[in-house]
Amino acid sequence: MELLNLLLKLSSRLHSVVYTRLCESGNARVFRLHIYILIYSVLSLLNRDLEYLKACILAETFYIGGECQSSGNCCSGIMLFSNGYPLDTVAKFQDALSKDFKYQRFNYHSGAAHRIQSYDCSQLSKNNRCLDYENRPDFCRLYPYSYFIEKGFLRSGCGYNVRLRNSLPIFWYPPLRRYIQSILLTQSF
């Protein structure tokens, strides 16, 4: 994490020095994206945690527009996560529930070998509106952004859509390039 902070500070300094000399004002987002990609590539080679940078790259590359259509797609048939890990067993769900009461609003559907296949929110009304909107969990508040960053796509019918902000830069690091390409294949631009 210290290396990540150092590289982010370096990118900020690079941005201010190089940007003012080399970039035109309309290209700031593209320049930041290139810096993020460079840092991501370096950190990948060092086997560092890259979720924050991946989120930065997605935010600079894609735009999410639209509005909620009250389809209920974001509230039913979903997988819950805690600290980045799926709550795919009853034991994991019970552990997460003991740490955060907001999980109590979810009902799970289990499959073979007591594995949880998906969850439905008990606070979803018949007209697909949240009955406890003010107290909803953070991952609900951050939808569709959190879902897109985690999954690389949005569920169909929700009313939100993903668009490219600019033409794509060159992604040097092959796993990152494949990830971005997989997003492009799942979305219709």
Image (cartoon, rainbow, N blue to C red):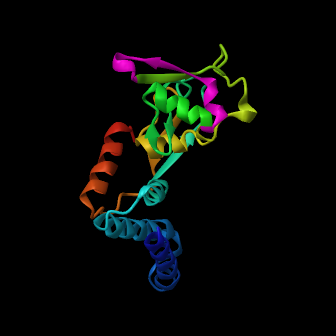
Question: In the image shown, does 16 or 94 lie closer to the viewer?
Answer: 94
Where 172 sits versus 95, above or below? below
x and y, in percent, of residue 56 in the image: 48, 59
Does the magenta-highlighted stretch encompass residue 65?
Answer: no
Question: In the image shown, does 70 or 1 lie closer to the viewer?
Answer: 1
x and y, in percent, of residue 31 in the image: 44, 71
Q: Residue shown at 51%/82% (left/top)?
A: 13
x and y, in percent, of residue 32 in the image: 46, 69
- Residue farthest right in this picture: 134
Q: Residue shown at 31%/40% (left/top)?
A: 185
Does the magenta-highlighted stretch encompass residue 109?
Answer: yes
Q: Is 105 on the left or on the right of 43, as rendered?
A: right
Q: Residue shown at 51%/77% (left/top)?
A: 9
Q: Quadrant of the C terminus?
A: top left
Magenta extent = 99-115
Question: In the image shown, does 5 or 69 lie closer to the viewer?
Answer: 5
x and y, in percent, of residue 122 in the image: 63, 19
- Residue farthest top in this picture: 126
Q: Is 169 on the left or on the right of 28, as rendered?
A: left
Q: Is 37 on the left or on the right of 15, as rendered?
A: left
Where 3 sits versus 137, above or below? below
Q: How many marks?
A: 0
